[in-house]
Amino acid sequence: MEEYLNEVEMMYIQNTGGDNYTVETMGRRTKSVKLNFSKAEGVEIVASRPLEIKNSFIQMAENQNKMWNMRLSYPTNFRIRLLMGKITIEVV
């Protein structure tokens, strides 16, 4: 699975249990997109172009949902895919 998402302003990454993840993106001019991944070891962000994060929150405590929320400084285009057991989020 490979998705190209344009003008993303917010991204939510959540571990939904075990090796299952959900990546949800939002933007002002684009609809919300929710992608579900299974059999993923983790998440990698590849920024070959600058990626500026306005604010970010990571929650990793025990007995809590593990999540990473990001608000970007400006709309950004991404390619999101599952590659060799990890979710790769690439700035394009």
Image (cartoon, rainbow, N blue to C red):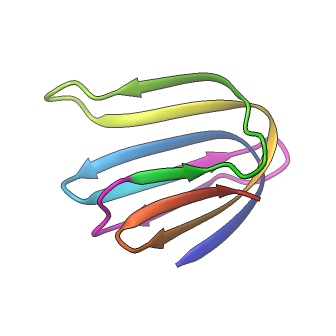
The residue at the point 85 percent across, 47 percent down is 29
Segment colored magenta: 24-42
Hey, which residue is sitting farthest front in the picture?
48
- Along the horizontal axis of the image, is 66 left or right of 58? left
- Along the horizontal axis of the image, is 66 left or right of 8? left
6 lies above or below 10: below
24 lies above or below 66: below
The residue at the point 28 percent across, 29 percent down is 60
Hey, which residue is sitting farthest bottom in the picture?
1
Q: Name the quarter where the C terminus is drawn.
A: bottom right
Asked if residue 25 lies in the magenta stretch, the reply is yes
Asked if residue 41 lies in the magenta stretch, the reply is yes
The residue at the point 75 percent across, 44 percent down is 27
The image quarter in which residue 42 lies: bottom left
Q: Nearer the viewer, residue 52 or 68?
A: 52
- Along the horizontal axis of the image, is 4 left or right of 60? right
Q: Report x, y in % for residue 80.
A: 59, 63
Q: Report x, y in % for residue 73.
A: 78, 28
Q: How many marks?
A: 0
52 lies above or below 6: above
Q: Report x, y in % for residue 70.
A: 58, 32
76 lies above or below 19: above
Q: Nearer the viewer, residue 67 or 31?
A: 67
The residue at the point 45 percent across, 61 percent down is 87
- Along the horizontal axis of the image, is 62 left or right of 90? left
